[in-house]
Image (spheres, helix red, strand yellow):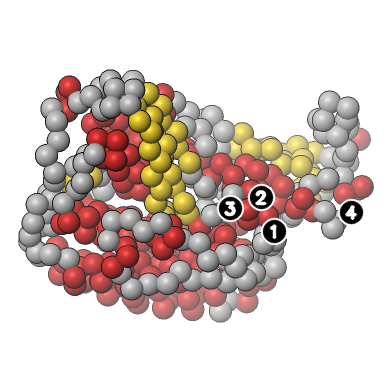
């Protein structure tokens, strides 16, 4: 019996046979199978969900990944340390800068490199810009699952403003490769802070409008309040992190619990709620959207104007790192994001392993949460978990 539905009557659902597989007699016309994805707007990326239905009620859900698989970890293990970063960012297209940070920090810890103070401030700014553009996509995206498509259009425009700043700073809009082992590639362009503040003022207005559009909307509430509730007892058992865990009452944030870069010098507190349904999982991200705007303003107001932005590093074509292992974590918009790296004294990593929140939340959690749900809620439930399939099929 599934932990997630221990109080429900599962006798009406098809039961597993001796081999553990579900016994579904499709010829009886009682159950039907339906695939959602992989090329479907109701799936957050290149993955699919195989649904078994009784009418419009889900009796079993199985996730299928592999439609995007490129063996990211193994590719990194066969490339020089500087080359590996260009591969690591592909493990989450929606938020690549977090991958840049954990990869570079692993290399730096294993090499004994301390990056300059200026580089710490710039890296923190970029990471919060990354969280911001992610929230600008996912917050109104939750409204889009209930028909509020205008919010998605607003959010994508606001996200484009932040991508403009990324392009100005790094030369790229999606993949940036601005971090490099030892620091960053350069200082902020002249006038960057002014243009960023102009963008943030537009986002301030968007935050108010999306609040009116979604969180006071009767239809949105009807479709999200008390739907797909996560019991707090599941958080530790399933390794749930980020906004999904904080909405269930857990005050956990890597930026506070394991401070890195200059987060310990910034003034902020994680937002925590005590009822993790779709509504509150979306609402907490709305609060964190505001928080990222505030943190960017704090960073720009306090960061030095000049300074060294990169520490000296060996010749990247012959960079041999001594034997060792390192685990570096960061707080992405989806929660704790970690990279484990092992070195053997050669010019390439011996082992690289990513720990992203999507595996637990898009496979283990999602498959159980969908049992008993209505087929119309599949899209909304999945978006509320903010999954990134490349993290799973890495």
Pointer 2 residue: 237
Asked if the residues shown at circle 3 and circle 4 are in contact, with their CB atoms under 8 angstroms apart, the answer is: no
Residue under the point 91% across and 48% down? 12
Q: Secondary structure at mark 1?
A: loop
Pointer 3 residue: 240
Between residue 314 and residue 290, name the one nearer to us.
314
Relative to residue 122, is residue 212 depicted above or below?
A: below
Asked if the residues shown at circle 2 and circle 1 are in contact, with their CB atoms under 8 angstroms apart, the answer is: yes
Image-based side of 199 in relation to 16, left or right: left
Pointer 1 residue: 233
Q: CA distance from mark 1 to mark 4?
A: 20 Å
Image-based side of 391 in relation to 59, left or right: left
Sequence-first tag of 2 and 4 = 4
Between residue 217 and residue 384, name the one nearer to us.
384
Mark nearer the viewer, 3 or 4? 3
Asked if the residues shown at circle 1 and circle 4 are in contact, with their CB atoms under 8 angstroms apart, the answer is: no
Query: Residue 62: x, y in percent?
Result: 69, 38
For the question of whether residue 91 can be seen, the reply is no
Pointer 4 residue: 9
């Amino acid at each position: 019996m599934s932990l997630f539905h221990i109080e429900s009557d599962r006798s009406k659902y098809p039961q597993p046979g001796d081999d553990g597989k579900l016994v579904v007699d499709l010829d009886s016309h009682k159950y039907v199978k339906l695939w959602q994805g992989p090329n479907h707007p109701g799936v957050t990326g290149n993955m699919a969900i195989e649904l078994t239905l009784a009418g419009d009620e889900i009796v079993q859900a199985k996730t299928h990944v592999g439609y995007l698989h490129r063996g990211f970890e193994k590719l990194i293990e066969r490339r020089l340390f500087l080359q590996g970063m260009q591969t690591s960012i592909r493990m989450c297209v929606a938020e690549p800068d977090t991958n840049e940070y954990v990869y570079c920090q692993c290399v730096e810890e294993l090499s004994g490199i301390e990056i300059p103070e200026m580089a710490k401030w710039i890296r923190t700014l970029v990471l919060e810009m990354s969280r911001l553009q992610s929230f600008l996509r996912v917050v109104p995206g939750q409204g889009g699952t209930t028909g509020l498509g205008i919010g998605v259009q607003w959010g994508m425009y606001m996200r484009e403003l932040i991508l403009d700043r990324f392009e100005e700073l790094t030369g790229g809009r999606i993949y940036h490769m601005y971090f490099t082992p030892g620091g960053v590639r350069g200082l902020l362009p002249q006038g960057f802070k002014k243009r960023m503040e102009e963008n943030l003022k537009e986002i301030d207005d968007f935050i108010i409008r999306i609040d009116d559009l979604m969180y006071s909307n009767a239809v949105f509430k009807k479709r999200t309040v008390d739907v797909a509730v996560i019991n707090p007892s599941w958080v530790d058992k399933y390794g749930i992190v980020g906004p999904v865990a904080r909405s269930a009452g857990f005050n956990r944030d890597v930026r506070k619990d394991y401070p890195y870069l200059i987060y310990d010098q910034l003034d902020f507190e994680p937002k925590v709620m005590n009822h993790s349904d779709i509504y509150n999982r979306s609402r907490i991200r709305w609060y964190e959207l505001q928080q990222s705007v505030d943190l960017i303003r704090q960073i720009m107001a306090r960061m030095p104007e000049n300074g060294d932005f990169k520490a000296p590093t060996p010749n990247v074509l012959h960079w041999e790192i001594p034997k060792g292992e390192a685990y570096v974590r960061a707080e992405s918009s989806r929660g704790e994001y970690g990279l484990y790296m092992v070195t053997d004294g050669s010019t390439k990593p011996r082992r690289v392993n990513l720990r992203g929140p999507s595996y637990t939340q898009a496979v283990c959690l999602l498959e159980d949460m969908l049992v008993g749900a209505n087929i119309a809620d599949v899209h909304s439930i999945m978006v509320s978990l903010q999954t990134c399939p490349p993290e799973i099929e890495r």
